[in-house]
Image: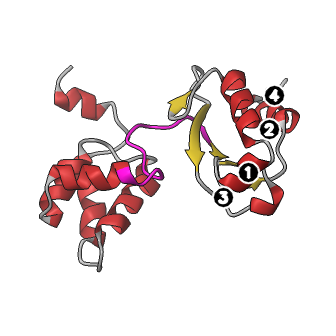
Amino acid sequence: MSQAAVQAAQDWTLEQIQQEIDAHRHRPGAMLPILHAIQDRFGYVPEAAVPLIAESMRQTRAEVHGIISFYHHFRTRPTGSHVVHVCRAEACQAVGARQLEAHIKERLGIDFHQTSADNEITLEPVYCLGNCACGPSVRVDDDVHGRVDADTFDRLVEQLTTTAVEVK
């Protein structure tokens, strides 16, 4: 498949990425706002964005890639319909996050940084959700859930994957 065909199948264009770069490039410390803007708009930072960002910011591709890979927040692949973040910080680990993590991986059949076969859920680690008093914690899209156990998680997943069918 040609580069043009690959890009045509994507939900972004190089022009749209350049618009985000141009909108933030003059801000102090512009690299992070640019990466956030691209991810907020497209759901991830496409690999094809790296050379554009590098050239616009007068950085090397390696420097841009280094920033993207350093921050766990940035993704370089599209996600499923929902993103589940599992807190791996010490406070959550102290109250069972490791067992919950194992259950979640088994339940979804995926590991961190992977998306379920039905493309519904992407599983990501996170190192603190700021909900330490109520661990173990997970974030489903933008909603943080505390005191999550295997049963609670299974109910959350049912809500995420249940499709309403209208009967006429």
Q: Indicate which disc, 4 or 2, sits on the residue closer to the N terminus.
A: 2
**Vertical placement of 51 versus 165: above or below?**
below
- Mark 4 vs mark 1, foreground winner is 1
Marking on residue 129: 3
Horizontal relation, residue 117 to residue 90: left or right: left
Q: Residue furthest right?
A: 151
- Mark 4 vs mark 2, foreground winner is 2
Asked whether the viewer can see residue 143, the reply is no
Circle 1 is placed at which residue position?
92
Q: Indicate which disc, 2 or 3, sits on the residue closer to the N terminus.
A: 3
Circle 2 is placed at which residue position?
156
**Vertical placement of 27 versus 52: above or below?**
below
Residue 32 picture quarter: bottom left
For the magenta stretch, what is the residue range? 70-84
User: For numbered disc 1, what is the local secondary structure?
Assistant: helix
- Mark 2 vs mark 3, foreground winner is 3
Quadrant holding the N terminus: top left
Marks 2 and 1, Cα distance to the nearest angstrom?
18 Å
Any magenta on residue 6? no
User: For numbered disc 3, what is the local secondary structure?
Assistant: loop
* Foreground of the two, 38 or 61: 61
Q: Are marks 4 and 1 in contact (CB under 8 Å)?
A: no
